[in-house]
Structures are given as structure tokens and as C-alpha cells.
Image (spheres, rainbow, N blue to C red):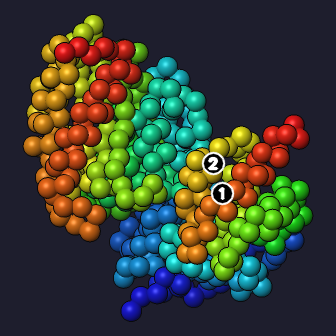
Amino acid sequence: MMEEYPIELTINGEKIVSTAKAEESLLRFLRRHGFYEVKGGCEKGDCGTCTVIMNGKAIKSCITLAGQANGKEILTVRGLEKEESGRKLQESFVQHGAIQCGFCTAGMLMTAKAYLDENHQPNKVEIRKAISGNLCRCTGYKKIVEAIYAVAEENQKSK
Amino acid sequence: MSTSRLLTQEFEYFAPHTLKEALDLLYKYKDEEVKILAGGTDLLVKMKTLDMKIDYLINLKEIPELKAVETNNQGLKIGATVPLSQLERREIIKEKYPALYEGIKSMAAIAIRNMATLPGNICNASPAGDTIPPLMVYEAQLRIVSKEGERLVPVEDFLRGVGETIIRKEELVSQVIIPAPPSNSGSAFSKKSRVKADIAKINLAIWLEREGKTCKDARIVLGSVFIKALRAKRAEGLLKGEMVSKELLTQVARQAAEEIKPIDDVRSTAEYRTTLARVMVEDTLKLAWERAGGELEG
């Protein structure tokens, strides 16, 4: 007990070798290592602001143990700009004014990125369902949905 | 006061790479407080919000043999750590097990479905578990393994009450086995919750087998209306061997609403749940009957 466990993972393409206590959440681990862009909100899996992408899937880092991320690839909102699909989403959020206080934005972007990677022609209702696990307390959902939809539409045209 | 920011328990963490290793650990620590992590979406929330004692935590997600989905003519075998989102993308689930597909789709957000698993939802044994009524109407069984052997238990017999199951401390659920439904059968799921991603006020699944205009066999299971998912057996009895008509389905739904034992809680009153159950059962019966290829007269 009280022992620290070795953890090796890749965050935004960068290899991190560290240790963590068994009871540390992935969210706390990420913030402890300087990834402050990953926000902690409710910290019990409801609000979605802590969403990161682990091995291609959106997950909630507050209810994931750091140990579960051992050997995995993590993408946070900071790593989005390295990928075209991520960059497009970031630009669209800015253009559509889909950011108010900004607290939900990181989680929204990660959910949207993982969703659009797997669903190429979503309509606005489907997008609303896709982001139903991410709360925006400014209630700026309309613009967020429009921003995601614009990227989906553009992807369609460029095919 | 509890905070959701930190896990306050101190425990030892294991992520075994073989099932044997996991079973050895469970056997070794069977007199201690051991928790099994398959998806973690309920476990971690409980660890953060309840005063829960835990000495050892075993993460099953690194065991390759538990990640497999096998399909054949007999049915489906789903490994313990297959995430729900992977199941909802399988054509066979959408086509042959629509009640399970709809149950999974009704659950939480994508990020949660990327983590959550069937055995997790079952072993958590919430009366509101959304995969439980579908698995019960398809007569799914659980493969329960321990160092000393294995047994197959129907989901219906596995659950005992709120958070209570028959599983022993040295055992774990390794697989969910769902038999293939006959071709002239139909099924459907229905759920009412405050917002989409919320916990059910009521959820239910119905499975009907058709022979011409007659209902040969029926299973009706409702969740969130008792200490565990409840089979409305008298309602099923009204249907079996009978010619199906709109009038009969109305009667069956009324009977089902009488059989449930809902309570007042933060999500609904018992009275509301009873009224809701009748309407939902009737609508879902019609849908399941249509999916079985049946027509409705009268």
C-alpha cells in the first residue's frame, strides 16, 4: 500500500514515463504533469469537461484510473492542432462563437473530434446526441452544434 | 464530507494479463475487500461518492481473452470487457437483438459507452440498469468463473436485489452468452428518463414469438419498478397461446402495470410510474409484435 506504480504512456505524441498511486485518476495525473488544459468539473463522470481521447476513443478521465492509461495513447485538446481534423474543429469553434466562458470547450472539442472521426455525415440532431455527455453551463449549445456541423459539412464536400 | 476530486481509499492495484492471473488474485484475496474493474463508470463514481472500503482493485481490461465477441448460429458470446459502444456498432446486434441495441443506445453519453461493459452493468445490479431487461428477455446467461471451475447462470437468477447478486467473492463474470432468437420473433426496448443520458424512471424490454396470428411465447421485463428487474409473468400468461389483437395488448399492458411494485423516489412517484408503465408496455408490445411480422386488427 501507498506504493507508487510505474506508468508509461504517450500524451499528444510525447512519451511520459512516471509513477502514480493506485488511487490517482487519469485527470489528476494529467494535471500533475502539466496538462492543465484537461479540466476537472464534477469529477464523477457527468459533466464531460475532462474528456480526453484514449487510443482513439473519447473517455472521461475523472473516472479513469491513471493505471488504466498505462501503455495507452492519450490525446488532449493541446494535441488537436497537430491533426487536420482537430485544427478544423478548433477554427470552426472560433468562427461560430461556440465558446463563451470556455470551461466546457476542451471536453466539447475532444468529444466532437472522436465523434467526427467515426461518423462522417451526422445531422444536427445526431450531433446533439453525441455531445449529450458534455455540459455547457453558459448553455451555448446552439453555436457548438453549428460549429461541429460546419466541419462535418465541409468534410462531406471535400470528398 | 466527501469530495469527488480525490479517491480517498488507499488500495493495491492489479492489471493482470491473463484470466488465470485474475482468478488466482481473487482466490488469494477472497477474505478481503476486492473490487473488479471492467469499465469503471459505476465503480469509480461509487468509490468517489460513497464511503466504500476497498483493499484491492483488479482491472480486467488488459486480459485479451475477455475482449472477444464470438458469433455463430447458436448466438452471441460477449467478453467481459467489450465496451458497449463496440456492441452498438455491430450489425448483428442491431438486427437480431434490437432490444439490446436500443437499451445500449439509450444509455449515457458516448464517452461512458466507450468505457462501460455488459457485466459491469449487470454486476452493479442497479434496478435501473438499461441492459438488464433486454438480456433477460433474450434469456442471456452469464459465464461465471473462479479458480475452481465455472458455472452458467441466467441473468434473471443472477440478480437478487439493489446492488446484490449471487456472485461469490472468488468469482467473476467472464462472458455474457445470448442465444439466437427464432426468426419469427420480435423484440423492443423502451425507456423514459428526464433527459437522454439520464438514469431511467422506467425501462422495459419485450420479446414475442409469433405463430401466424397467435403469440406463441412472450417475455416482458421492466426495470426501475422493483428492487431488481421484474418479469411480468401474469401479463405474459395473458398473451401466450392467444390471438393477438389491439384489445388484448391493452389488457396485457394493464396487467403488467398491476404487477410492478414501484416506489416514490427522486426520479418519479410510484403513481406516475404505474401509469407510465401501462402506456409504455402497450406501445412496446405493438412494436415487438410488428417486428415479429405480426399484424394488428381490431
Q: In this picture, is A106 found above or below A150?
A: below
Q: Nearer the viewer, residue B32 or B215?
A: B215
- Image quadrant where residue B32 sits: bottom left
Q: Nearer the viewer, residue A40 or B72?
A: A40
**Quadrant holding the C terminus of chain A:** top right
Q: CA distance from mark 1 to mark 2?
A: 7 Å
Chain letter of disc 1 in the image: A
State the SS at label 1.
helix
Q: In this picture, is B3 found above or below A157?
A: below
**Badge 1 local density, few (<14 within 10 Å), some, or many (20+)?**
many
Q: In this picture, is B220 found above or below B28?
A: above
Residue B280 locus on image (x, y percent):
27, 40
Name the residue at 56% across, 52% down: A129
User: Of marks 1 and 2, which one's residue comes earlier in the chain?
Assistant: 2
Residue A49 locus on image (x, y percent):
62, 72
**Badge 2 local density, few (<14 within 10 Å), some, or many (20+)?**
some
Residue A65 in view in this figure: no
State the SS at label 2.
helix
Q: Which residue is mark 2?
A: A124
Residue A105 in view in this figure: yes
Q: Amino acid at mark 2?
A: Lys
Name the residue at 46% across, 57% down: B197
Q: Amino acid at mark 1?
A: Val
Residue B115 locus on image (x, y percent):
56, 57
- Image quadrant where residue B286 sits: top left
**Quadrant holding the N terminus of chain A:** bottom right
Name the residue at 15% across, 23% down: B248
Q: Which residue is mark 1?
A: A145
User: Could you tell whether B214 is left or right of B187 in the image?
Assistant: left
Name the residue at 34% across, 50% down: B192
Question: Quick check: marks 1 and 2 in contact, CB under 8 Å?
Answer: yes
